[in-house]
Each structure stands twice: as C-alpha cells, then as structure tokens.
Image (cartoon, grey):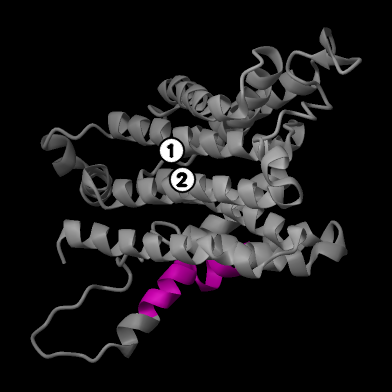
Amino acid sequence: MTSLSTIQKHLIGALIMLGAMTIVPAFVTQRYFLGEIIVFMIWASVAVQWNVLMGHAGVFSLGQMLIFAVGAYSAAMSMTYLDISPWMALPLSAVVAAAAAFIIGLACLRLGPAYVALLTFAISYMVYVLIITDTACYTTVAGGCQRFFGGTTGFSRLEDLGFRQMLRDNWVVGNYFTVLVVFTISLVASILIIHGRLGLAFRALSDSPVYAAARGLNRTRSQLIAFVVTAFFTGLTGAVYAAHFRSAGPSLFDFSTLLFILAMVIVGGLRSTWGPVFGAAMMMILVEIAKGLGDVRNTIIGIVLVLFVVLLPKGIAGMTSRLFHRLQPKRIGVRTEDPATDRT
C-alpha cells in the first residue's frame, strides 16, 4: 500500500469520525454528557499530539502539559490584559506555545532521551512554581486583585466564545462544535505528519540512524520540527480549554493530569495513528466509572497503565491490528504486513 493511499485511508476514517461526532448533539441533549464528550475531545487532541512527539519522533518529553498550559494561560492573559476576543486568542496562543516549544527544544533535544524527559519535567515544575509564588497584585479585575500570572487562583470568569448570547441555554452545543473543529484539525495534522515525509524521516532515523544520517537526515532538526508543530496544536487545544471553561489555573500542571494523558497514549497504543483516540475514550469511561472513589481513581489509572505496559505493550491499536490480521484469509504468495509494525 502506497503512502498516499495510507493517508487517504486514515483521512477517510477521520471524516467518518467527524460525521459521527457532528450528529452526537442531536441525540445527546444533556449538558453533562455533552460536557464530558468535550473533555474527551480536548484530552484526545493532547494525547494524539503527544503520541506523534513521543511515539513517532522519539522525543521523550514530559512537558506536554506545560505546552498545554502555555496555550491556556496565553489565551487567559491575552483576554484579560489585552482585551481581545477568545477567537483571536486561540491562534495567538497556539503561536506562543509553538515559540515556547522552540526555545525549550533548542535547550533539550540535543540530550539523550532520559535527560530530555527529566529536563522537560523540571522546566514544567519551574514554571509551576513561578506561577503559584506570584503574589504581587498586578491589576484589579471585578473588584479583586489579579496577579500577573494568576497565582494560586489562576484566571477565572474569562470572556466566553459568544454562544451564551447566541444560543442561550444551548450554548454548550456551540462550544462542542468549536472543540470538535480543533480536535479534527489536530487529528488530521497528526495523520499527515505520521504518514507524510516527516513521519518517513522519523521511521528512517529509528530503523537505521547511521544510514539516515548518511542520507542527510538530521535527528535534532527533525525532532525540533515535531516539537514545535505538536506544540502548536497542543497550545491551540489549551486555548480552547480556557475558552470553554472560562478559566486557567495551576491545576493544569497536576501530575495526576500528566499521568492521565500518558495513560491514554500507552493504553491506546504508542506509535499508532488512532491509538490515542481509543485510549482517551477508554480512560474517560474508566474515570467516569471510578468518579465516586476519590483518590483511589489515580491508583486505578496507575494499575491500568502497568497492566497495559506488561500485557499489551502495543495497546488497544496493536491488539485490534493483530485480531484484524488473524481474521483476514491467508493468501499463498502474498506478503502481509507484520502486525507488530502496522500503524493502526
């Protein structure tokens, strides 16, 4: 199967998924369930981009929630201090997140994988400490003190996307379709990266680094491009998160949130195409079931993550791929793809 037909296959899948998600509000009318689907699309978008970066580009970054928070905080600060509309804040925040990733990537990506993971996590924690220790009153908003970086309370009561005035009680439907557009853009971008020229470069660097270098492929440059591109879409998702919830705070840096998104990637299938979407759906269902268990919920997430790493290292996507190949009739003289390398 050629690269072009592979891209077409996955784009058709994305189009089918988009069509199915488009008609969901016609059947799901309760605001709570629509809100949960919105949260699913937000985290799935982050997981998809993290999978591109870690699974395909080989960048073991633990700073994706930092990039997400940069997008959310950029949207919140631009709306608060520059008085711009949320619609203008979305692309602006994505650009700021990409710029932040470029600076971080220049500092980190020449190091080994373990050092990249440690340094990106350290930078994320440093930014978190910088935010929560911000105690000086920068300005006054709604009669209260507003710290420049939000402090421990963050930013709240941000301007909404305008659907409350347009759709009134059905405003969540407008937010739903806004998040759906962002999720679709993120998913399509990941497909084009994984199965395009950049993805081919990643596979070459992974399979034979010496030969790839001899052909002129630079690992650091390729990884930096992936770091910046995935940061753009992750920052855009962070901005739409802030616009939907009308808030941005230090809770975005919680380790439990980082573990939750990482579990989506691992459970769905690292180095796959659709795995993070499957993983996001499964983890959202699991969290919904365990919602009344308090802190035990994080323990359950950890147990599920360990079980998948040990028993199903290729995740749901790998399991689905193996079942599909086993069900296919074997044809003599025709070479089929190895399920272990199939990027479902």
Left or right: 282 in relation to 194: right
Predominant secondary structure in magenta? Answer: helix
Q: Is residue 304 above or below residue 204?
A: below
* Residues at marks 2 and 1 touching, judged by CB atoms closer than 8 Å: yes
Q: Please check the rendered image and state whether residue 179 is part of the magenta-colored stretch, yes or no.
A: no
Whether residue 306 is visible to the viewer of this picture, yes or no, is no
Kind of element beneath mark 2: helix
Q: Please check the rendered image and state whether residue 318 is part of the magenta-colored stretch, yes or no.
A: yes
* Residue at (31% x, 82% y) in the render: 325
Residue 137, position as x, y percentages in the image = 84, 9
* Residue at (42% x, 76% y) in the render: 320
Whether residue 208 is visible to the viewer of this picture, yes or no, is yes
Question: Which residue is disc 1 drawn over?
Answer: 230
Q: Nearer the viewer, residue 51 or 23?
A: 23
For disc 2, the neighbor class at 10 Å (few under 14, some 14 to 19, many from 20) is many
Left or right: 122 in relation to 248: left
* Residue at (62% x, 19% y) in the render: 84
* Residue at (42% x, 43% y) in the render: 53
Q: Amino acid at mark 1?
A: Thr
In 3D space, how far apart are the residues under numbered discs 2 and 1 (Cα atoms)? 5 Å
Task: Specify the segment rendered in magenta.
Answer: 305-322
Q: Is residue 105 above or below residue 234?
A: above
